[in-house]
Amino acid sequence: MKFYIVLENHNAMVTDEQTISKSEADRAGKELRLEVTSSAMQSLSNWRAMHAQPLSAAYKLLKQKAQFLDKNVILSQRLKRAPSIIHKLKRLSGMKLSRMQDIGGCRAVVADTGKAIKLLNQLTKKAMKLEKDYFRYPKESGYRSLHLSYKYKPIKEENLKYKGLTIEVQLRTKVQHAWATAVEIVGIFNQQGLKSGDGDQKWLEFFARVSDEFAKIEGLPTTGQFDSDDNIKKIIELNDQLNALSTLSKYQVTTQFIDKKASNIGEYYLLILQDKEIKITPFTKNSYQRAIDTYLAFEKQFNDDENTDVVLINAQPLK
């Protein structure tokens, strides 16, 4: 099991050579539906890299508003993985790469639903739009979050090339984040797409039922697909069958720095998760292009390896 992650500087800029038009992006997306070629992957990488500046602007606004409401808020940002982009292009026949709204995304995890709603109200007054309310209308899987969109409006002339690019902003409570993280971790280590609703039906049912109980605690609607009276009993039965809680407790990792001479506090980090061990290589503040090139190289190398994931994120502080 391998898992590669690169953390990126949220003030990063792309060069003119990396800049491509919407039509060029759409041609690459059309090609990727049929075949993953080196040229199409390079175009996808360039289009994705262009979202770094809009992502920085959205993240800055989110951070400002979120930290005012909740000093313990957990903030993160990422550029969408190439396999996820390609899968979405293939799954949605009418989807164009230029219209994909979640290539860049950032998230705030706050204490409770009250703070999440207050943060939502603050953000929708400041250039963001609520797209999906999974608080009131949860997914069948039990997934809950608030999804907003942020359309970039540049002030500086050198940023005009990013005009209109859209960033997805997610708001979650700590309970919802714990649930979603557990789903993703089990999916990774069991090599199943639980996050997308694929894989072992018992695990999917277990998480959906647990999510309904969490919703009751948070005063949110349940999914409505289970009998509330015996839900706890069913969760206990599924836990016994899956050994779920014990399994989750075993999914822990150790961390080591590969480059002993490098500072462990950088602007970029290459994290490799292999055999439950995370190996971290930091990049300096001026190494954005090298991080991007490394990111693309790993995606090309492991394109056909279903057991390997690559993602570009920011989640300061490093700890």
Image: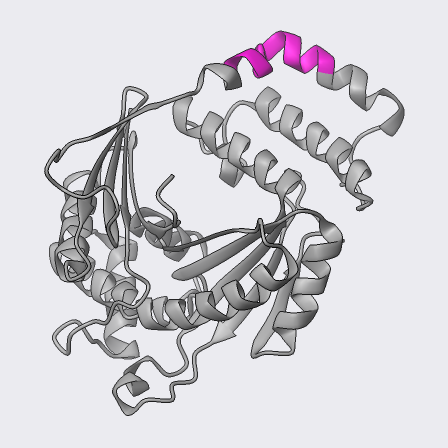
Rendering coords of residue 81 (x, y %): 33, 50
Q: Is residue 77 above or below residue 207?
A: below
Residue 92 found in image quarter: bottom left
Q: Residue at x 33, y 63 (%)?
A: 10
Q: Is residue 238 inside the magenta stretch? A: yes
- Front residue of 11/177: it is 11
Residue 80: quadrant of the picture: bottom left
> Is residue 137 visible in this depiction of the protein?
no
- Give how far across and how far down residue 253 sits, in percent: 36, 23
Dominant secondary structure, magenta: helix
Report the front residue among 92 and 199: 199
57 lies above or below 141 = below
Residue 224 relative to residue 314: left or right? right
Position of residue 63 measured from the top left corner of the image (x, y, whole percent): 51, 63
Q: Quadrant of residue 25?
A: bottom left
Residue at (58% x, 67% y) in the render = 65
Which quadrant of the figure contains the C terminus? top left
Q: Nearer the viewer, residue 233 or 55?
A: 55
Query: Residue at coordinates 48% horizontally, 25% vertically from top-left?
Result: 186
* Region in magenta: 236-247
On screen, residue 30 above or below 229:
below
Farthest residue, direction right: 229
Q: How many badges with numbers are in the image?
A: 0
* Residue 100 position within the rendered picture, expressed as x and y whole percent measured from the top left: 42, 66
- Which quadrant: the N terminus? top left
